[in-house]
Image (spheres, rainbow, N blue to C red):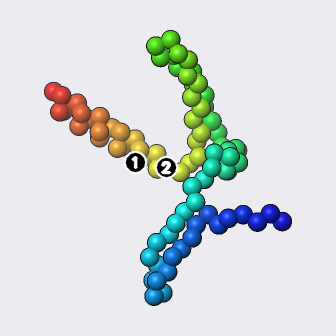
Amino acid sequence: MKWTEPSERIIFIDNKTVAVERKKATFADMVEQYKDKPTDTAIYEIEGQTFIVTAHFVGEKNLDKVIYDHAFKRALEETETA
């Protein structure tokens, strides 16, 4: 059995939670965690340089909120420039 470091450490003072330290996931950890999630790959060319972008859909965002926030910011920008 392989021993690993805990992903978070909770600090207590006088039986009260003071802080929670979390270990940042490494790239290898994230690859393993999300390997079965759907992806989408797009190729962009900007000023003669080719970029390949792979999006990983991990389901950690509320899509309704993301779309609403984007639409709100866009509408606000349009009213400020008009």
Say if residue 34 shows up in the picture: no
Quarter occupied by the C terminus? top left
Q: Residue furthest right?
A: 1
Q: In the image shown, does 48 or 82 lie closer to the viewer?
A: 48
Q: Residue at x 24, y 33 (%)?
A: 77
Label 1: state its secondary structure.
helix
Task: Please say if 78 is above or below 73.
Answer: above
Residue 4 image point, x, y percent: 72, 63
Q: Which mark is residue 61?
A: 2
Q: Nearer the viewer, residue 64 or 69?
A: 69
Picture layout, residue 7 above or below residue 42: below
Query: In the figure, is residue 10 to the left or right of 35?
Result: left
User: Which residue sits at x=76%, y=66%?
Assistant: 3
Residue 13, compared with residue 23, is above or below; it is: below
Residue 71 at x, y percent in the picture = 33, 38
Disc 1 to disc 2, C-alpha distance: 8 Å
Residue 51: horizontal and vertical position, in percent? 55, 22
Q: Residue furthest top?
A: 48
Q: Amino acid at mark 2?
A: Lys
**Disc 1 + disc 2, Cβ < 8 Å:** yes
Count all numbered tags in the image, as a single digit.
Answer: 2
| Residue 1 sits in quarter | bottom right
The secondary element bearing badge 2 is classed as loop
As rendered, which of 63 and 9 lies closer to the eye? Answer: 9
Q: Residue under label 1, please give it.
A: 65
Q: Amino acid at mark 1?
A: Lys
The picture places residue 24, in percent across and down from the top left corner, at 57, 55
